[in-house]
């Protein structure tokens, strides 16, 4: 290398290259969010298939069978859960559509776009909130599924209590990690 030539200066990063790199990461994150919401939506429909009236639980005491009010709550929680997952997925798909429409005409730059990062981050946070709310209502509906299948919690059915405890601990722990990560990413 001669004296005239200077080495490439990698310390300068333009806002355009930052936007293009982070947009690719955002598209990948949005894809993941839509895929996870799809799996949860399947769980919602499985729960909806369990809303049959006068169903006997596995508990030998018929007084521990869930009544129509538990089946009604299950149905309501499933519909609300589905609504939040659909909201989250539609916001994520809308953001992906905006990125692709604002995209360069060059096919090789499929994941690079100039988009307002504040709007993108706000949309991603809205989508994440929709997923969290969907998970909370799905968890509530699963508590009702457990009561329908294993007996009412008020009867003290050990298997129902253990199943609900495991559900609450694991899902709550996962949601705390997810929420913490989303807030950290939003603030940094």
Image (tube, helix red, strand yellow):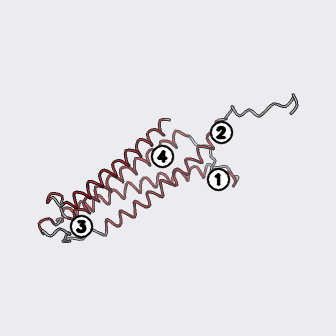
| SS for dot 4 | helix
Mark 3 highlights which residue? 149
Mark 2 highlights which residue? 16
Mark 4 highlights which residue? 124
Residue at x 69%, y 31% (from the top left corner)? 11
Mark 1 highlights which residue? 110
Q: Is residue 116 left or right of residue 127?
A: right
Q: CA distance from mark 2 to mark 4?
A: 20 Å
- Other residues around mark 2 within 10 Å, as few (<14) / some (14–19) / many (≥20): few
Asked where in the image residue 151 lies, by quadrant, the reply is bottom left
Which mark sits nearer the N-terminus, 2 or 1?
2
Q: Is residue 160 left or right of residue 117?
A: left
Residue at x 15%, y 70% (from the top left corner)? 60
Which mark sits nearer the N-terminus, 4 or 3?
4
Q: CA distance from mark 1 to mark 4?
A: 19 Å
Q: Is residue 186 left or right of residue 170?
A: right
Q: Are marks 1 and 4 in contact (CB under 8 Å)?
A: no
| SS for dot 2 | helix
Which mark sits nearer the N-terminus, 2 or 4?
2
Percent of width and height locating residue 13? 67, 34
């Amino acid at each position: 290398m001669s004296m005239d030539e200077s080495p490439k200066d990698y310390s300068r990063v333009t806002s355009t290259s930052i936007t293009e790199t982070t947009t690719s990461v955002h598209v990948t994150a949005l894809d993941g969010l839509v895929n996870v919401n799809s799996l949860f939506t399947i769980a919602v429909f499985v729960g909806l298939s369990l809303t049959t009236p006068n169903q006997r639980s596995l508990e030998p005491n018929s007084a521990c069978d869930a009544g129509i009010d538990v089946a009604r709550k299950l149905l309501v929680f499933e519909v609300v859960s589905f609504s939040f997952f659909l909201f989250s997925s539609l916001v994520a798909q809308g953001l992906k559509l905006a990125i692709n429409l604002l995209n360069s005409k060059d096919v090789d730059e499929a994941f690079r776009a100039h988009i307002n990062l504040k709007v993108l981050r706000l949309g991603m946070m809205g989508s994440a909130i929709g997923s969290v709310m969907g998970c909370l209502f799905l968890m509530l509906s699963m508590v009702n599924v457990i009561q329908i299948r294993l007996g009412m919690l008020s009867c003290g059915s050990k298997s129902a209590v253990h199943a609900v405890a495991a559900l609450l601990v694991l899902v709550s722990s996962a949601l705390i990690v997810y929420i913490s990560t989303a807030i950290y990413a939003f603030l940094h």
